[in-house]
Image: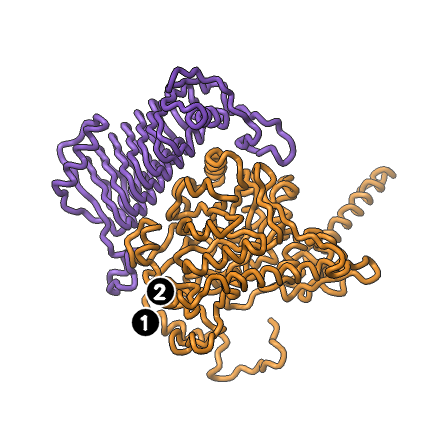
Amino acid sequence: MEQVSAAPQGGRYDIRGLAEPDATAPKNAVVSGSTAEFDAAELSTRQVNLELRRLVYGEGVTEVTVHNPGAKHSLSVGLLARCRVRIDGSLGYFGCGLIDGPEIHVTGRVGWSVAENMMSGVVVVDKNAGSLTGAALRGGDLVIRGHVGARTGIDQKGGTIVVGGNAGTLTGFMMQRGRQIICGDAGNGMGDSMYDGAIYVGGKVASLGVDCVEAELTETDREFIDRKCAIYRLDQPATFRKFVCGKKLWNYDNLEPNERKLVL
Amino acid sequence: MTTPNGESSAHNLGQSRIFTPEVIDDIHTKSELGRYRMRGFSMFKPIPHWDELMFLPGTLTRFVIEGYREKCDTRTVLGGRFAKRPLELDIPVYITGMSFGALSLEAKMALAKGASMAGTATCSGEGGMIPPERDLSTKWYYQVIQSRYGFNPHHLMLADGVEFFIGQGCKVGLGGHLMGQKVTEQVAEMRSLPPGIDQRSPARHPDWLGPDDLSLKIQEVREATDYQVPIQLKLGAARVYDDVRMAAKCGPDVIYLDGAEGGTGAGPHIATEETGVPLMSAIPEARRALEDVGLADDIDLVVAGGIRNGADVAKCLALGASAIAIGHSALMALNCNKEIPGVTDYEGTIGVEAGKCYHCHTGRCPVGVATQDPELRKRLEVDQAAERVYNFLHTLTLEVQMLARACGKTDVHSLEPEDLCALTTEAAAMARVPLAGTSYVPGVSEDRTLAEMKELLAKHVADTGNQGGANV
């Protein structure tokens, strides 16, 4: 149970204990020049975020280590500055969401929707990630060294998602732009209803989703994959296959009568 | 089944009540198209509406307030629950979210400017922030919508309120639609999409599925925005009681309910006609839900859908809304469906006369409102249109004040269900106000009588039991 800093009182109390309108930064970080570290074990979500923001925006710290994050939700969100954050442990849902600029290293696992809507920056997760990884990602690199759950890169609008292990069902669902590199296998319905972008898969693909087709892997693609895997020191399989949008759903009205059954 | 007055009940050969000429035409059209019909505008089929409610102003039972001479407050505050900066509006009406893409740049700018003149808010809608709209809006909602088109955390930080779009009344359960003709290079780039494609937005959010995850998503956005601004959940009115209870437990500051009468810039005709419930029935259900979870005084209720005049607004306030959002009627203030001599030719370009146009989805809007065509856009002059929007918002407010004063209120938010009666039993049942001239509220009256009977019976059983009567 998370600590709630505001005393429960009438409408100011959120039934799930998630709202903390009156919390203040705990100021428990040890600052050493441009680096800092603090222990989050006894802190609430709000206090961790307030402390992070105080250090990055207020104290001019550029490298922060957070110990014992305790898989809390919504940690390290909304950071809009260049900085380095090391999360020494695991995150819950919505970790590192709505960020622009930071380089974040999570040494443990993450829950759903990590780095959702990231604009730029880097998020590296050493172990596994849950579903909806990199939802609506717009830029930057999101690297999961382990496996990921379902609907990775749903609504992805840019950036690159790199997965060292396997990906679940509906990977790249409704993807619009950007790239995904899946070193392992991908589940059923991959690339379903994708508008654009590319998914590279090193392992087996269980099945393709609606309007997702295989394309030729070019030298440029190969170079891109090599470069990304080298940057993040990922072992990559010998070969990759490339999957893109079939573009049949772009203008449904233009389809021939027999093609319209595509969506059934 | 009732037969409308004066209508023949004879079963005439060749005059089907089921397969009317319009239905036959609809089938012919679909047989050609091979898909559902798209359209803009609001609802076309009859639906119980605000016309079926009347006000019961003060006479001798309560005294009335003088117009102009005595104040009738219209100030409206939304989201004071957790937000450090609640949204403060001068009037109880604001402009709802309509996307740049569905609307032209000029339309978005005119709405923003007109709303600011009236001291009220606008909303980004889908498709991201356009800087001119933000610049012209003194109060501005930023929408977190399923597609997240153009969603940018920097823009989020500029918002005065954050609205989670979960559904809209006109087509509950569906995502947005924008047909290829309106997906220009600029619109496509803002949405990270290829230009010219038919864009059917997701109906579900990418990063949460149900209320448990939504609670956490709200927490995420609150953390990102530092609890500065209200969080509002916009729901299409359907299973209102259960939806509002669940929404309330997700921890928002404001809940927005959109009735089935609401409009759209593009939607499948069948969905716009066949989904949702009338706003009149939704507001009492929402109030009951908020009361049952103990948050009636803490979570504000915004409502929208088919609002045309100050009486509609006043009726919403009386049933328990804190504020009313308008969309389609604000577009009409911009000139939607108005023939401008020497400029527009509705019959020639659209094929229908002004007043009957529902072709927003085609992007051929003759008055430059629902279009991206550079030539058509020139027909909407921003400053003049903004003044019309302001005039309309101001008139709505005057009308609300007039009715509120007549009902003896010095604050429009003091209007209450007791100020209303219904002209039909259906309206009485939905709005939970008595049928005119009676004390009968369908459903409520019966429940009350049943409760009285149960109480009397229980008393009778207890009394006879105390007397030691046998075989009771």
| Rendered colour, chain B | orange
Q: Are marks 1 and 2 in contact (CB under 8 Å)?
A: no
Side (left or right) of B54 relative to B347: right
**Disc 1 residue crowd, few under 14, some 14–19, many 20+, Cα 10 Å:** few
Which residue is identified by label 2?
B373
Question: Which of the two residues, B1 or A169, is positioned nearer the viewer here?
Answer: A169
Q: Position of residue A133 (x, y in %)?
A: 34, 36
Local secondary structure at mark 2? loop
Q: Position of residue B180 (x, y in %)?
A: 32, 60
Badge number at residue B32: 1
* Sooner in the amino-acid sequence: mark 1 or mark 2: 1
User: What's the residue type where badge 2 is placed?
Assistant: Asp
Rendered purple, the chain in question is A
Q: Quadrant of the C terminus of chain B?
A: top right
A147 vs B237: above or below = above
Q: Residue at the location (69% across, 52% down)?
A: B73
Badge number at residue B456: none
Q: CA–CA distance between discs 1 and 2?
A: 27 Å
User: What's the residue type where badge 1 is placed?
Assistant: Glu
A53 vs B347: above or below = above
Local secondary structure at mark 1? helix
Q: Residue at the location (14% across, 43% down)?
A: A217
The image quarter in which residue A34 lies: top left
Q: Residue at the location (47% across, 48% down)?
A: B166
Question: Which of the two residues, A72 or A165, is positioned nearer the viewer here?
Answer: A72
The chain containing the residue under callout 2 comes to B
